[in-house]
Image: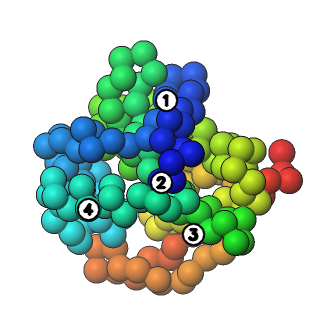
């Protein structure tokens, strides 16, 4: 993340997005990345994460336009997960990724709020003209988040990845800055 975003804070009703810090990398955070239920639909399920691999990932955002933020409860400051935005400045595009690791918070709207906060920030504050996101067809929770955040289904890559040893489509969604 570039220096102009070091103090970035995006505040919503219940959630707060803030820069992801080295101190956020804990045994709990690493356990989320290694929990096959949490990363069931992500290619993270094929990796074994460690504190060191998480430090390396965080470092990969240094001096880039890409954004890596903590998703936390606004009131308690409890970490619920993380959200990233991979930005292509020359094209005015950003691709968002979300992980809500704290399973006790699933189904309570925190993922939707975090996604919408990041998407709206990118479209209104960072001169991004198009935000994208993708997920496996079987990830109904993430599909609902993208639909409820007013993204449109842009494309399908048929039988693109294997899930439980069966080919599954990937759905891609987008939202443009000129859409309300």
Q: Earlier in the sequence, mark 4 or mark 1?
A: 1
Q: Earlier in the sequence, mark 1 or mark 2?
A: 2
Instruction: For the residues labelled 1 and 2, say whether their Cβ atoms are less than 8 Å apart.
Output: no
Measuring from the top left, give residue 58's x and y in whole percent.
Answer: 33, 55
Q: Nearer the viewer, mark 4 or mark 1?
A: 4
Q: Most extreme residue toward the top, as rendered?
A: 75
Q: Earlier in the sequence, mark 1 or mark 3?
A: 1
Foreground: 130 or 112?
Answer: 130
Q: Nearer the viewer, mark 1 or mark 3?
A: 1
Residue 171 numbered mark, or none? 3
Foreground: 132 or 26?
Answer: 26
Residue bearing mark 2: 1
What is the spatial separation of the Cα atoms under label 2 and label 4, in whole angstroms?
13 Å
Can residue 136 be seen in the rendering of this structure?
yes
Q: Nearer the viewer, mark 1 or mark 2?
A: 2
Measuring from the top left, give residue 104's x and y in whole percent.
Answer: 30, 31
Relative height, residue 139 to residue 47 (above, below) = above
Q: Secondary structure at mark 3?
A: strand
Tell me the residue at 35%/79% (across/down): 162
What's the image's color scheme? rainbow
Residue bearing mark 4: 56
Tell me the residue at 54%/44% (across/down): 5
Residue bearing mark 1: 16
Q: Secondary structure at mark 4?
A: helix
């Amino acid at each position: 993340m570039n220096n102009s975003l070091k103090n970035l804070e995006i505040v919503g009703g219940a959630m707060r997005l803030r820069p992801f810090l080295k101190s956020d990398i804990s045994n709990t955070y690493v356990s989320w990345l290694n929990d096959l239920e949490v990363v069931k639909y992500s290619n993270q399920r094929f990796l074994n994460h460690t504190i060191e691999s998480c430090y390396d990932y965080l470092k990969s955002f240094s001096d880039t336009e890409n954004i890596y933020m903590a998703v936390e409860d606004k009131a308690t400051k409890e970490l619920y997960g993380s959200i990233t935005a991979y930005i292509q400045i020359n094209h005015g595009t950003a691709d968002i990724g979300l992980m809500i690791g704290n399973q006790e918070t699933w189904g309570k709207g925190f993922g939707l709020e975090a996604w919408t906060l990041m998407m709206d920030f990118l479209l209104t504050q960072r001169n991004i003209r198009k935000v994208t996101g993708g997920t496996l067809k079987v990830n109904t929770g993430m599909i609902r988040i993208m639909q409820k955040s007013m993204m449109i289904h842009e494309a399908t890559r048929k039988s693109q990845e294997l899930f439980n040893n069966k080919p599954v489509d990937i759905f891609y969604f987008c939202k443009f800055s000129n859409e309300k």
